[in-house]
Amino acid sequence: MAYQLIEGGGVTSPKGFVAGACYVGVKSRKSEKPDVAVLYSEYPTSCAALFTTNKFCAAPVILGREVLKKGKARAIVINSGNANAATGAQGIEDAKRVEQEAEKLLGLGEDEVFVCSTGVIGQRLPVEKVIDGVHKIVPNMSAEKGSEAAWAIMTTDLVRKEVAMELKLSGGTVRVGAMAKGSGMIHPNMATMLAYVTTDAKLSADVAQKMLKESADKSFNMMTVDGDTSTNDSLFLLANGASGVAIETEEDKAAFAALLDEICIDMARRIASDGEGATHLMIVEAYGLPTEKDAKLVARSIAGSSLFKAALFGKDANWGRIMAAAGYSGADVDPTKADCILKSAAGEVVVMQDGFGTDFSEELAKQVLTEHDVTVVVDFHSGDGQATAFGCDLTYDYVKINGDYRT
Amino acid sequence: MAYQLIEGGGVTSPKGFVAGACYVGVKSRKSEKPDVAVLYSEYPTSCAALFTTNKFCAAPVILGREVLKKGKARAIVINSGNANAATGAQGIEDAKRVEQEAEKLLGLGEDEVFVCSTGVIGQRLPVEKVIDGVHKIVPNMSAEKGSEAAWAIMTTDLVRKEVAMELKLSGGTVRVGAMAKGSGMIHPNMATMLAYVTTDAKLSADVAQKMLKESADKSFNMMTVDGDTSTNDSLFLLANGASGVAIETEEDKAAFAALLDEICIDMARRIASDGEGATHLMIVEAYGLPTEKDAKLVARSIAGSSLFKAALFGKDANWGRIMAAAGYSGADVDPTKADCILKSAAGEVVVMQDGFGTDFSEELAKQVLTEHDVTVVVDFHSGDGQATAFGCDLTYDYVKINGDYRT
């Protein structure tokens, strides 16, 4: 591939993007972690976004759908610690106030700022605190503060999630950067997940929206932590054209789309890997299904099986649970032909072949499953459909974290 | 209702049913628990059955579908410790041998014995041991041994699940009994769940099948432990007419159907209550949805939410997760009108009203959630659709049990 990693890069690596963050105490609990961030493009943009499918969606999502219609948002204000969900008309008013204050401060027009919130559901957003944060951040934004923003948006995440890459095209070099937060309530069709992708390539809003959807279907929508689709999930792409390079030829479009896939998959892997309580990243590769749709159903079903997730935590090569999950996925599968392989940096072990369990080495299997990143390969030899899903194991810590998150 | 509990009753409480059980060591692990059971009707029957929707279904399920076609099975052989799933043609041959041996021993014709297996997937059934068990059991079956059979079918279940009730009809009294096993891999559209319902009422096979499906849709198909639909789930109804009472009038049919519902719901509650690692039974009552289908989606989605299950374990009245689960259920819900109440023997607390969180007493909520049986009531005030689902909490022990089940 023609694209290259930008070491230490993130959401402000593409030209013309700046960011900033600060601590205002959105959650009354004391913390040193910043909890408000602003991401801003110094140039006009084409923007694209995808939002949660949860009907019980948060106020910022309701507002965001409106902002998206204009397709030219230049800034995003994000707070962690409070989801501004289940807050009714008051919540929408609060989110709108944050949006309007930011638009005024940044000298932008109506519907040019997205607002995002993540955290506890059902408590009123401390709107004055968030606005106070925006006032503090805006005068001090810079291209060096992308990483601070990535920190500010974290909730129960343990690690920051950011990446940037560059791509040489016929007309010059373009950059794509991203940051995300994940952790719990993570499931296909958006997770409790906020992800922000920036690029200095020049794209129309229509092309941006189409490409973002296609990449999301290979990445964020193929990821599950706990099967709970959140009220706040949002994915954004801001393209500001600051590189002077327009994505126009079919060849450039294909190259750029591949890079966008790579960036989104990278973020999805990091979110799954840092799932609440996770000790393993689970990558499920499904092959040989009649259609791609079948393959997606199978891959996601395995990645989401509580029983196999618990087995992975216990380093138990319980392939029966893998096949059971394939069987109830709703996909057109024929288990009598299936192969199943468990792989990691420690090696690989064929646990099932032609529909039968093999006499594999339990010791080797345990070694394979001791690695952090574990790949489950299933092949049904019934067609060309293939897909990859991302998940994590189910651990004591998931239960612990979610047994007393709110109180 | 006209039906009454038969104290200490079970699957052999209806007239003309006998059972027996013994230990043969299906799982090599030593145990004192019996692991093979036989249930037998001394009279010809009409039988009905429902099987798992998992495509990766076990050999006994494949065979069972054939036996069901004749609709007159009189006996069921059940083993725990081995699921006889993912065992290919060999598995079917093994199950067939058990069936045929039992038919011979019991003097029955072809397709008159169901075979059921539950336990580990992917290991060959120790068929000689199971047949040996049948030989031991058959000469010593009695109406007193229903409870022994209920013990034999348990895997990680902690308690036996059996019940019997009687009902006075115009033509006399009929009895319905049941036993079941559950624990993990429990999810709608059949769970790792085996359930056996017997009755001495006289029913046609067609009516039996229809009634069984309707009752299952209110009970076993509204129950979830972990979202994993097993390869072996089966529910049976044997009606032998030994009471001499035929269910023919519409009134009798309605009364009998209500009793069958009650029996199936009772079993489903017990299975959910004894879910792997569970410390709570969760009963979710959804009201005021546009349709019954919407209500079922909402109730099951809440009962299945990993996040709310973990919150229940932590006695945390995290109603935001309840509403989020309603929101992603796929049902037609309007969260802005919703009420949510948490109830138990300790009292009740309204945590959400007209779409807003209330200023409820956290202390009272904790008391309510300290009880074993907790009811979540949601009302969307948007129609007459209502449904009830059964689940349990997600605990450290679920993870522990499933982290090293096989090894």
Image (cartoon, coloured by chain):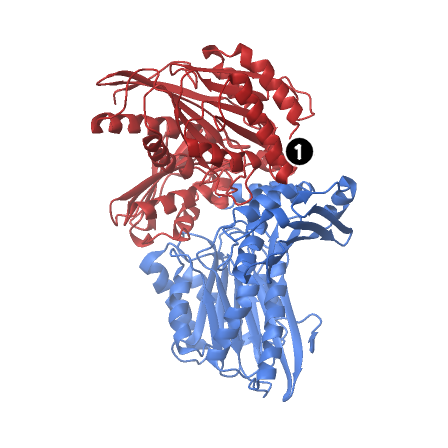
Chain colours: A blue, B red
User: Which image quadrant: the N terminus of chain A?
Assistant: bottom right
| Quarter assignment of residue B341 | top left
Q: Residue at x 55, y 55 (%)?
A: A155
* Mark 1 nearby-residue class (10 Å; few <14, some 14–19, many ≥20): some
Q: Position of residue A128 (x, y in %)?
A: 42, 63
Task: Residue B267 in the image: state x and y as whole percent.
Answer: 42, 27
Q: Residue furthest front?
A: B109
**Looking at the image, can residue B84 be seen?**
no
Left/right of residue B324 with respect to residue B87 in the rendered view? left
The subunit letter for the residue under badge 1 reads B
**Residue in the foreground of this view, choosing between A30 and B360:** B360
Identity of the amino acid at label 1?
Arg
Q: Residue at x 60, y 45 (%)?
A: A323
- Left or right: A142, with B106 as reference point: right
Residue labelled with disc 1: B124
Whether A368 is drawn above or below B134: the answer is below
Q: Nearer the viewer, residue A64 or B82?
A: B82
Above or below — where is B119 with respect to A92? Answer: above
Give the image location of residue A124, x and y in percent.
Answer: 39, 55
Q: Residue at x 54, y 25 (%)?
A: B78
Residue A86 at x, y = what percent? 37, 54
Q: Is residue B115 visible?
A: yes
